[in-house]
Image: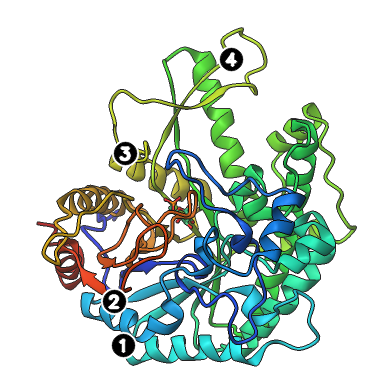
Amino acid sequence: MYKQTYPKSFPKGFLWGGATAANQVEGAWNVDGKGLSTAEVVQKVDDRHQVSMGDVTQETLDIAIADKTDTRYPKRRGVDFYHHYKEDIALFAEMGFKVYRFSIAWSRIFPQGEDQTPNEAGLVFYDHVLEELAKYDMVPLVTLSHYEMPIALTQKYNGWAGRETIAAFNKFTETVFNRYRGKVPYWLTFNEINTGTWGFHETGAIDKGLSEKEQLQIRYQALHHQFVASAIATKQLHRIDASAQIGSMLARMQTYPATPNPEDVRAAQLEDEKNLFFTDVQARGEYPEYMNRFFKENDVVIHMAESDQDILLENPVDFISFSYYMTNVTQHDQDGDSVGNMVIGGRNPYLKESDWGWQIDPVGLRITLNAMWDRYRKPLFIVENGLGALDKLEDNQVHDQYRIDYLRSHIEQMKEAIMDGVNLLGYTMWGPIDLISFSTSEMSKRYGFIYIDQDDDGNGTLNRIKKDSFAWYQKVIASNGEDLG
Ligand code: BG6
């Protein structure tokens, strides 16, 4: 007889934790043999509503390489996790973290991208991080490439635009899979791979100033190389460490039609497809037809080697991860022209927004989880979600009730999605310690449960201070998501 059961709540062993990226926390950009990375040549902007990540030209690159200070490049200093990792991991353990997501800086291991042998001091640093996590039974979830690569590869091949970068990356992945075999059960290849359509920070390719058409060509070609490299890494991992799993990582941007006008609904569907395309390739192993049409209509030609399609098809990812911060609204082109030419990022009158204008949408997370589960039927992992806010430190305390409210409302919807039947492995909130903002390189856009005494200019003691949300998350984890009060 058919039994009508359904999951009632978070499963036993649900992986609660937090996520960071090397270039936003480690600092120590020029010690122990580390090479310069693409993240470390992106200048900080002065207006918090601007973004800095795509604005690299040959000229700014030369200036950055010649500049041996971190004044204009805050990602060079991070929050000095390199020297504070023991203290930071102990704080994560105190909150009860079951998992910690961090990234390995490729430029610590292969400083020039194509070095004959890896840099031992770089490998040792991550040995130590993994040892520390093991002490607390914390599961590592490791991102292989989080918005950075050795700058030498930009100089030689224009980053991922050059096919040669595939081999360099897969030498790096093979090295770390061998070194950390048996110690890392979950890996991710490229962080928010879809943001390669925005340019430099993900592709490492300088294309600023080129026409939109030329940029499209470079970016999608670079992304193709990343797809292939990701599939090769998947194959390597399955051979080297059969019990480990590897996932894709998407910046999921659910979009809603601006009105019930079928033209808007279709425009939103198209927009959504352009976002899901990346996971479609990585999970299903082939380019979807809708993108082939998009490429044709936009004169994009993806150059593939003969074996590329087989490599993609034979090596899909084991699980699917994504970041979730906000949703958008899409409407069709006002002139009724091509629906491909639509307005994105419209405001939604039903939602509030963060200090940085990101529209907060907890129910959208439930919608996203259900849609992703339906589409792929592979385990899901929320590897980023959180609130960047202007925190105030008073009497050594931060009363961040707004952060608790944000996280609570998202966790509630996550629970609903699990009750809907979604297979969710875990949740790593973004930025458990304050870190350097990816998009603006500010320090004052804070996400953490742990405040770090450092300002936008790098002044401060680097002391770690627990915010109110610290004890709250501790309670959430101890109750396996039941006590969200
Ligand atoms: C994601 C990135 O886009 O969002 C992180 O993977 C980033 O690296 C996070 O920090 C939040 O963005 P921001 O710009 O507020 O730091």
Residue neighbourhood size for the residue with mark 3, other residues' Cα within 10 Å, grouped as few (<14), some (14–19), many (≥20): many
Label of residue 433 in the image: none
Q: Which residue is mark 4?
A: 333
Q: Amino acid at mark 2?
A: Phe
Q: Amino acid at mark 1?
A: Tyr
Q: CA distance from mark 1 to mark 3?
A: 34 Å
Residue neighbourhood size for the residue with mark 2, other residues' Cα within 10 Å, grouped as few (<14), some (14–19), many (≥20): many
How far from the left and from the top, in percent, is residue 446?
32, 56
Question: Which quadrant would residue 64 be assigned to in this image?
Answer: bottom right
Q: Amino acid at mark 4?
A: Asp
Q: Which residue is mark 3?
A: 361
Asked which secondary structure carries label 4, the reply is loop
Kindly indicate whether the residue at mark 1 contacts the one at mark 2 (C-beta within 8 angstroms): yes
Q: CA distance from mark 3 to mark 2?
A: 27 Å
Q: Which residue is mark 2?
A: 92
Residue neighbourhood size for the residue with mark 4, other residues' Cα within 10 Å, grouped as few (<14), some (14–19), many (≥20): some
Asked which secondary structure carries label 2, the reply is helix
Q: Which residue is mark 1?
A: 136
Q: Nearer the viewer, mark 2 or mark 1?
A: 2
